[in-house]
Image (tube, grey):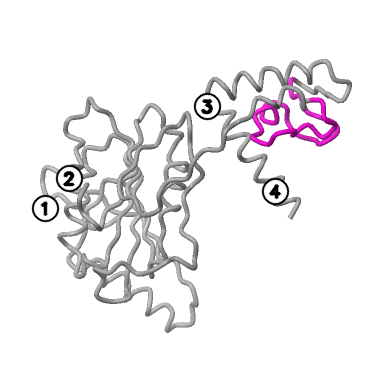
Amino acid sequence: MFLVNKLQEIFKAWNIAFDPNNEQAELAAKRIAICNDCDKKASNLGFHRCTVCGCALKAKVFSPKKGACPIGKWDEVDELKIEPTPESDPNQKLFKIDVMNIPEVPTVPTSTMSTPTNLESKETIFVQIASYRDPQLVPTLDDLFDKAENPQNITVCVAWQDSEDDKWDNLDKYKDDDRVIIIDIPYQRSKGACWARNMIQGRYNNESYTLQLDSHHRFIPNWDSELINMYKELQNDGYEKPLLTGYISSFDPDNEPAGRITEP
């Protein structure tokens, strides 16, 4: 348990270090001043670490843990408490992400997970889309639902890294759609594709399947049933947890569907 807590502290510290708020930066400055005068500080090729705990000081000084110095040298300055960030409501469909004050990725406890009431079967799909100022996002969502055999069984979560200047990047038609979860992230505050996908994965709610896509795709009719059938065929062949992957062929958004390339 100690190791798990330690790893959590390290990850949180690095996360804060990337983009601290004023209070966090002020506390880190006071901590590093103490470390610079400490005989336990070691430096090698510009890399500074604590020889007691072994941590890199660059991140360690941003630890959200009060009294994080293993020999107690930060105890006095740590009276400047770093307030915990409130978690997002896991039932909220549209919410803003402020990277200056990022919550932990919201998760739904297993004991409270339930299948949405609008689903007619257990064959549900959680679709993950990280979009960065992509003019093809809305057409992708339109085609995804239009071509699905069971669109009512699909939940799409979009990490929408958007700009107010992009008038074409408008998700108003999906903001009241129960099938779509929108994480609204001002593009200047995005921390990259993998970070955005991690935010999406925190919204998984025990669906039967999950599908990760880019924000510029087109679909074949009944694509959802086709994928589920492929998955089940592989299970019948003895593969317990098959993974379907593909190098998707290109398409021409101005010449649909004639402009599709049929081979990767």
Pointer 1: what residue? Answer: 258
Q: In the picture, which quadrant includes the N terminus? A: bottom right
Left or right of 166: which side holds 67? right
Q: Mark 3 and mark 2 in contact? Answer it, CB < 8 Å.
A: no
Left or right of 112: which side holds 121? left
Pointer 2: what residue? Answer: 252
Pointer 3: what residue? Answer: 19
Decide which of 125, 119 is in the foreground and name it: 119
CA distance separating discs 1 and 4: 55 Å
Left or right of 32: which side holds 125? left
Image x and y of residue 118, in percent: 24, 68
In the figure, 34 relative to 156: above or below? above
**Residue kind at label 4, given as amino acid type:** Asn
Mark nearer the viewer, 4 or 2: 4
Please give the range of residues in magenta. Answer: 46-73
Direction front: furthest residue: 79
> Is residue 63 one of those drawn in magenta?
yes
Image x and y of residue 85, in percent: 52, 38
